[in-house]
Amino acid sequence: MVNFEEEITELLKKEVKAKDIVLEKPPKPELGDYAFPCFILARELKQNPADVARYLADKIKKTKSVKEIKATGPYVNFFVNKDALAESTLKKIMKEKEKYGSSNSGKNKKILIEHTSINPNASPHVGRARNALIGDSLVRLHKFQNYTVETHYFVNDVGKQIAMLVLGSNNKKNIKFNDLLKIYIEINKKIEKNPELEKEVLELLNKLEKGDEKIKNNFKKIVNICLEGQKKILSELGIKYDFFDYESKYLWDKKTDEVLKLLEKTARFFFDKDNRFVLDEDGFGLGMRMPVLVLTRGDGTSLYPLRDIAYNLDKISKGNNIVVLGEDHKLYFEQVRAALLMLEKKAPKPVFYSFVLLQDEKMSTRRGNVVLLEDFMQEAVKKAKEELKKRYNKDDDTAAKKIAYGAIKYSILRVSPEKNVVFSWEQALSFEGETCPYIQYAYARISSILKKHGKKVDSKINFSLLDKAEEIDIMTKLSEFNELVDSATGQLKPHFIANYSYELAKAFNEYYHKYNILKEKEDVKKARLMLIECVRHVLKNSLGLLGIDVLEKM
């Protein structure tokens, strides 16, 4: 495929002595396809930017791919050959199909992506699902770019919350996954009313770290019940993990002890009045009145940060790292990063995400006012079934699940991670506007047109026939997919893909409403069928990177 940006950059390099040549997209089609701003160059040359633009426009030679070059004020505008755009883009998509947009940028590179890592103390709520959905999309993006990807889940199987569950589960038999949230809420309320119970929780943790086999088995039993339940729910959404890394491993292998010894060598630690091991993090710009990180309790048992540092050292030894975290973990992450810097280690690259809001509330497992992901998924399927019944008078469980789960994923992934998601059932499941059903419907509509055509799309077409403004717009969008995937992967921004999917679906739908493809003259019909089949391939690829299934019919 012709890479117009690269070709124009090379043309400029022959005339411009600059390290970095940055092209822009003009705001209007009549201003061309690419523009080179001459401000910086003009400042270096001590000339008027408009004069520099005119000089370059006259000097640079046109090519087969670049058919016109002209100056407009301080910009050099480049107009590409639309026939070359059509031929190179569509031929590449028809050849590569499900591989289109992929590259070898990750070849021979390994990446570890840690995501979800929910405390194994209850069924996950919708807010936590954002972590898993972002993480899963990042995994898909990196695999698409041919990275060797390991997906990790850090299991907090020895923390205080698990100890509370173990205490709350005493004298209870046949505990099931769905019982855990109720038990967790109950024990929290009991501890609030009777703070003395806190001592029993800490005693459990003390016995655990000392290797009490009965306590270890009690912890393991509760954690396994919860983890299996969580895995089942997340696998229903197509989210899977390569490794479940247990915190307890870093206790039993004495890795936490090793970390303490390493940190002692930095001379950045002290024991406070409660005999806790505390790390002095002054000078790391944490913005805290007392920049310290407490790593142990007074009885010597480890706290989560100590086990997390040990875990990070383990991950760092295996390759480059990405971790997905809630925005409420930003300060904590910076504290862990500071500890790793003391040990001369590079911290993972974080992706922070904000809250999912329903009815203007944040969701909290501790308080019990939660919307569980499992219930949320069931409600989505129910509403999708109702919509299918109303629109098409049909019952289709498979289609309803694809629409429902796609709606949940898209509504969350379309929003930049640092912004809140305000979820609305009406908007998420709408077949109009910026929603997943709208995009899935565009794919299904193309599939229906191709089915009615009843033949294999002819790849030998007259590319010059695709000269309508709508067709050029679609082909331009298709040609941008490779670069977009690179950007989404490099910047860890799945919402780039989500927004692109909608824009492409919208461009197709507007085109479909204007032109009756199957009733055109034969040569025009062939060209347009090839165009929409390419749209179909790219819609499937882009939704696949979000973990969303397509439907052949709706």
Image (cartoon, rainbow, N blue to C red):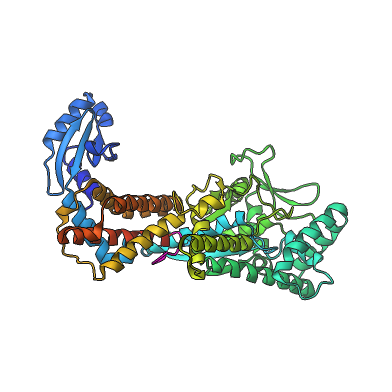
Q: In terms of image quadrants, where is residue 67?
A: top left
- 45 lies left or right of 417: left
Residue at screen point 56% across, 56% down? 131
Compared to residue 111, the image places residue 32 above or below, namely above
- Which of the 4 image quarters holds residue 175? bottom right
State whether residue 369 appears in this view.
yes
Q: Picture coordinates of residue 330 (x, y %)?
A: 59, 46
Q: Is residue 145 visible?
A: no
Identify the residue shown where x is 55% and y is 63%. 381
Please provide percent x and percent y for residue 72. Answer: 21, 30
Horizontal arrangement in the rendering, residue 504 relative to residue 267 (left or right)? left
Residue at x-position 23% and y-position 58%: 528
Q: Is residue 112 left or right of residue 254?
A: left
- Tell me the magenta residue range: 546-554
Residue nearest the viewer, comparing 354 with 414: 414
Q: Position of residue 203 (x, y in %)?
A: 82, 63
Q: Nearer the viewer, residue 346 or 54?
A: 54
Q: Nearer the viewer, residue 514 or 32?
A: 514
State the residue in front, 405 or 207.
405
Give the answer, above or below, for where 500 lies relative to 393. Answer: above
Q: Per the image, is 417 magenta? A: no
Q: Main secondary structure of the magenta part?
A: loop
Q: Is residue 67 above or below residue 397?
A: above
Quadrant placement of the C terminus: bottom left
Q: What is the total number of numbered labels drawn onto the structure image?
A: 0
Quadrant of the image containing the N terminus: bottom left
| Residue 83 point in image, percent of width and height | 16, 52
Residue at image location 71% in from the left, 53% down from the top = 369
Look at the picture and state if 419 lies above or below 1.
above
